[in-house]
Image (tube, rainbow, N blue to C red):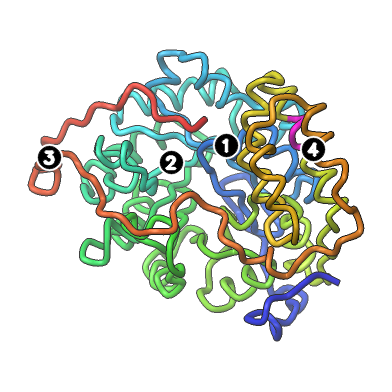
Amino acid sequence: MTLRSEENANVALPQPGEIKPLTIGPMEIFPPVVLAPMAGITNAPFRSLCRKFSDDRCLYVSEMITARAFVERHERTLQLASFGKDETNRRSIQLYGTNPETLAEATKTLVEEWGVHHIDMNFGCPVRKVTASGGGAAIPVKPRLLQKIVRSVVASAGDIPVTIKFRKGIDDSLLTYLDAGQIGEGEGARAVALHARTAAQLYSGEADWSAITKLKEHVKTIPVLGNGDIFEPWDALRMIRETGCDGVVVGRGCLGRPWLFAELCAALTGEEPPAPPDLGGVVDTILNHAALLADFFGEKHGLTQIRKFTGWYLKGFAGTKRKLPKLHMVNTLDELRELLADLPRDIPYPIAGLRARRCKHAKTQTVSLPEGFLAADDDDLVIEDPDHVDGG
């Protein structure tokens, strides 16, 4: 039986028919679970790992790809935009950009040459270098610019569904999510997703699920997805029941816990979720993940990528912190195997690992915007995409 935190002790499994499939254009996703696009995380190897745990039942979105860099065929961007051999259907990619024409060109290429099945648009990234360029979470501040961007991508995508993801706003004094949702609906997006935090919050504090409820009340003709604080399958059930949202987007709760998708698939279809792996199973997953990364990026860069995951995987396991300094410097698969070989395999998964924070930012920020951005007339606003903002 799976672990439960105290806050989820009394959450009941759904009744037959309670949880509905999620429909995004021609795609039907059941259970209604989406892997959030995360820079430097949701590359093809990680998506493959999550897919195996959930028998390919969810929607797995790539990390954010910069439209300008994609159009200019930057080698690194093209690699991050690529799909694994196992991604033959539901090829899903998230685009970032600020220029409607560049985004339209990137969309046309993705649809006609890359065979994507879904395009998500990033209007929620809170990272300073993105918002300081007028992108990500800054764009919904300019509703007419947002409208032009969504309209151009939807037109270029043809029959391929386009969705948009955004935050509540810049901060509590500048909330934009209701307008963003209605613009997405009006311009032909097939679903909208809300990370129920402001850009100023980054990943701190608690997600405001009441904002998801409000968005669902305003957006009536397309699905509304909720994102924020899905650490356990029971959280997903609570979010759907409390907000009325049509599905959940799972982000940092799955870092170092790709088996969360197996638990979500079980719980949302009325089955008791499987127990999380013991330490031996976690070690096996780390090694599997590292092998996938090495195969995709090459061993040198792949092992650089696995370093940040090791602490997330081992969260809550007593006595493992001593391993982290060397794990964060690992260079080869053999070295990784050697470092993990002496860990006991039969240690049960710790309840403290369920809701442990797995993110870079535990603080709030003052959101950086271009000079004069708030005062500018967005009908005349021209924003140039930065050369490269993709994760790594």
| Amino acid at dot 4 | Leu
Q: Which residue is mark 2?
A: 121
Labels 1, 2: front one: 1
Q: Determine the CA span between mark 1 and mark 2.
A: 11 Å
Q: Determine the CA span between mark 3 and mark 4.
A: 49 Å
Above or below, 94 relative to 165 = above
**Residue 222 in picture, x, y percent from top left:** 48, 58
Circles 3 and 4 in contact, beta carbons < 8 Å: no
Q: Determine the CA span between mark 3 and mark 1.
A: 31 Å
Above or below, 201 relative to 149 = below
- Name the secondary structure under disc 1: strand
| Amino acid at dot 3 | Glu
Determine if the magenta segment contains residue 290: yes
Q: Determine the CA span between mark 1 and mark 4.
A: 30 Å
From the viewer's perspective, tell me whether residue 136 is left or right of residue 203: left
Q: Nearer the viewer, residue 143 or 137?
A: 137
The image quadrant that residue 354 belongs to is bottom right
| Amino acid at dot 2 | Met
Instruction: Count all numbered tags in the image, as a single digit.
Output: 4
Labels 3, 1: front one: 3
Determine if the magenta segment contains residue 159: no
| Amino acid at dot 1 | Ser
- Name the secondary structure under disc 2: strand
Q: Which residue is mark 4?
A: 339
**Magenta span: chief secondary structure:** helix
The disc, 3 or 1, on the residue closer to the chain's N-terminal end is: 1
Q: Which residue is mark 3?
A: 371
The disc, 1 or 2, on the residue closer to the chain's N-terminal end is: 1
Which stretch did the figure color magenta? Answer: 288-292
The disc, 2 or 4, on the residue closer to the chain's N-terminal end is: 2
From the viewer's perspective, tell me whether residue 303 is left or right of residue 211: right
Q: Residue at x 42, y 75 (%)?
A: 210
